[in-house]
Structures are given as C-alpha cells and as structure tokens.
Image (cartoon, grey):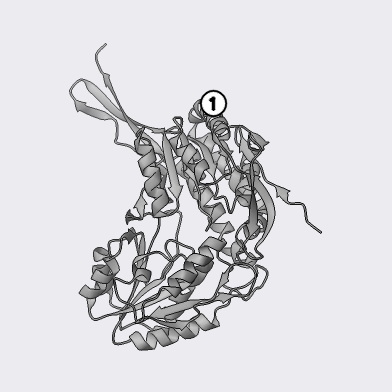
Amino acid sequence: MSTELRRLRNYIGGEFRDAADGRTTEVVNPATGEAYATAPLSGAADVDAAMAAAAEAFPGWRDTTPAERQRALLKVADAFEERAEELIAAEVENTGKPTGLTRTEEIPPMVDQIRFFAGAARMLEGKGAGEYMEGLTSFVRREPVGVCAQVAPWNYPMMMAVWKFAPAIAAGNTVVLKPSDTTPASTVLLAEILGSILPKGVFNVVCGDRDTGRLMVEHPTPAMASITGSVRAGMAVAESASKDLKRVHLELGGKAPVVVFEDVDIAKAVAGISEAGYFNAGQDCTAATRVLVHESVHDEFVQALAKAASDIKTGMPDDEDVLYGPLNNPNQLKQVETFIERLPAHARVEAGGKRVGDKGYFYAPTVVSGLKQDDEIIQQEVFGPVITVQSFTDEDQAVAYANGVDYALASSVWTRDHARAMRMSKKLDFGCVWINTHIPLVAEMPHGGFKKSGYGKDLSAYGFDDYTRIKHVMTSLED
C-alpha cells in the first residue's frame, strides 16, 4: 500500500499557498530514504508574489518601534518553547538527526538567539550627535535595509533560519526565506508560528530548488541577499547580486584546522575533537575535521582518535546511543564516499571509511592519516563524518598548514601554553579561534569567516548591524 504524502506549502502574505503552476518535489527522510512529503517547486510567479508581500509590509514594519519588534520576537521565542516537540519532530524528519540531541542542542540555542536579537533591536548604536562643523548639528540614523532575500541550508534548517530571520526582523526588515529543497518541513512550521504573531508579509517562505533561489537573488525588490551554503552557491549569489548592487551576506564553507601541540592531555583532546568532528555527521562548516598534530605525539593521537571513532555510533533518530544521524541526501553520501575512494596511496584509513546499513544515508565515523598538505581531502570540504590527521614539526609549520587552504571560517588550538595559544590566535587566519575547545557558539559573539568562507557576520551585535544601513543627518542651527 502506498502512503499519501503530506503536502507542504509556501507561506506568502499571511497565507499558505501551493506553487502557482502546481509543481512539487518530493521530500525524503534521510534516515529511511523514503519520501514523506511534497513541497512546492516555486517559480517566478511565486517569488514575485512573496517579494510583493514583503515590500507591502515593509513600511509598516519599518516604522514600528524597537520595543514593538522586541515584544513580537519575544512572543516568537516563547512559541518556540511551547511548540518545541513539534519543531523537533519536523527537524528530525527533515534531517534524520538524533531526537534527543535536537531537543538539547538546537531548541535552547535557537530560543536564546531569538531573545538576544529581540534585545538587540533596542540597542541601536551610532556616533553621538554633535556640532562637528560650526553652526551645524550632525547625527546618525540606523535604519533597516528593506526586503531581505534569504536562503538557508540543509545541515541546520531550523537554526540557520533563526540566524537569518531574527536579526533581519529585529532591525525592521521584512523577509522572504527559502529553505533547502531537501529540508523544507521545519521552515514551513516556523512560518505557521511566526505568521500567528507577526503582521502578514513580514515573514514569507518560498520552497524550491536552486533555480528558485536564483530567482530570489535576481529579483529587483530585495535590498539584500543572504545565503548560508557552498562556496559555489555564494559566488553565484555575489555575481548575481552585483548586477543591481544588492547588499550580500555570505556564510559559506569551512575547513577548520585543529592544531594539537605536544603538551595536551591526549585523552581529553581526542574526546573534545571527536565530538566536534562527528557531531551532525560532520555536516557543519566549523566541524573539527582537519587535525594537525605535533609529530612527537602524532602516532599516539591517531591511535586514540581511531579508537574513539570506533566507539561512536551513528543510527536512527530514536536511538539514544548515537552521536549523529545520516548524511542529508544521496548526493552528499556519494560525495563522502568518493572522497575516500580517491584517497592517494600514501593515505591510511585508520577507522570507518564505509557506508553503514542498506537504507538511509549513514556513513561510519572515519579517520584518515598519512596525508600531505596538497591532498584533495585536505584542501576541499568533505562535509561528512571524516577527520583527517597531519603531523607538523613546529609552530611555524602548524600555522602554514592551518592557513594553507582557501577557507577561513573557524579553527582551534589545543595547548597548555598560554603564550603559545595567544600567538596562534593572532596568526590563524580564521573568523573564529577556539582554545582547548571546538564548536561552541554563543549569541553574543560573531560567527563568520574570511577568504572563500564568505563575509558578513551571523549572531552578535555585528550580525544585527549587517541588516541595517547608516544615514547621516545634518541640520543648520540657524533660524
């Protein structure tokens, strides 16, 4: 017997709608490999309608006070807590993530981040008003940029949606958000929650594929385009947005170096690094997947890491013993498999290196050693549960290896030497440097990278600032 698939719909101007031309795409649960829903495959008419709704709502939302926007977002945060189990169920079906970890590691940060940006709405900063020229007073207005076109990824569909809509809406903008075509379910539920609190048109959701995202970025209405995704997607967005000089906010790939010096507690470092490398199946731009270890402890570290990997489980969402679930889609599983298949002869697979099970998209925790700096798996983002290990001889070589990639999002240093940690934090060319930890994020601190990891910041007051524009106002003091 065939099971009828659930129908997901766009949310435009306060209404749930099918795609104008009726096109849909199937949505697959990556833990089972089976379709559970259909979602609109939105085209130009749907994008036009969403942009028109957002543009119509913008003047009214722009003119609300920061206190009004704060109250609305605090209601959103409260609603997230009240409907947490629904959100968890939708996200688990979206992604196959462990249910327990989604409950403890995603819902609380999301709620906290919304509340942070609710407060940021009332903390607008600018140069103090004053007479910088005789007889004239100047002051600064900080204003929303307008309609924001936003594209969220499939690795953290709910949380990345929060990172996008919360600062934009707090600053007085209106939003058209597109989830990934493989993970729209939780975003459609977010639309239901936000739609019950915000004025119609302030928050809109358009489901679809890459072409839908392209139509959003190319559309003349948005003043800003924001994307979390691959380097290739970011470059395409930047090129497209340049045609009408849209503001662009890009959070792209990563290849985080994890620099381990000889003075560390090996067991403690391995425990922290393995969790930060395999969490969410390594599908995290900041994942601790490129480890650089001092040559004097390299062999001991590799042995301990391989043992840790063999003890880590992947499996179905309701299994309380698993650290991570499946890769998101068959293409991603194939990408990870082919990285391992193409390893050079000098590489050694110390653990894992294979698919797990015959349904869903599960891949074993993997450790690869014996690698050289110019190897493909060192230079390119795998985005899977694969940790590579290289050795280095001294601090200068560690820095050269760490910085010797195109990505520059996150990094970490593991040492008991405070002075060394401070030197490394200065020399590492990454947007974040953790010391003796890896992967924690807080709402108050910025997240974003350099080089091919993109530009602009998520989280923090800096992330809020990215959704505002600065206007100088000068007035004569004469009658």
Mark 1 Cα-neighbour bin, 10 Å: few <14, some 14–19, many ≥20: some
* Closer to the camera in the image, 243 or 193: 243
Q: Residue furthest left?
A: 134
Residue 195 location in percent, x, y? Answer: 63, 38
Q: Quadrant of residue 8?
A: top right
Q: Residue furthest right?
A: 1
Residue with the mark numbered 1: 56
Residue at the image point whose x is 42% and y is 50% from the top: 233
At mark 1, the secondary structure is helix
Residue 255 location in percent, x, y? Answer: 37, 65
Residue 97 location in percent, x, y? Answer: 60, 64
> Does the rendering let one see residue 2?
yes
Placement of 328 over or under 124, stated as above or below: below
Residue at the image point whose x is 56% and y is 59% from the top: 106
Placement of 404 over or under 108, stated as above or below: below
Q: Quadrant of the C terminus?
A: top left
Q: Amino acid at mark 1?
A: Glu
Q: Quadrant of the N terminus?
A: bottom right
Q: Quadrant of residue 256?
A: bottom left
Left or right: 276 as drawn, with respect to 93: left
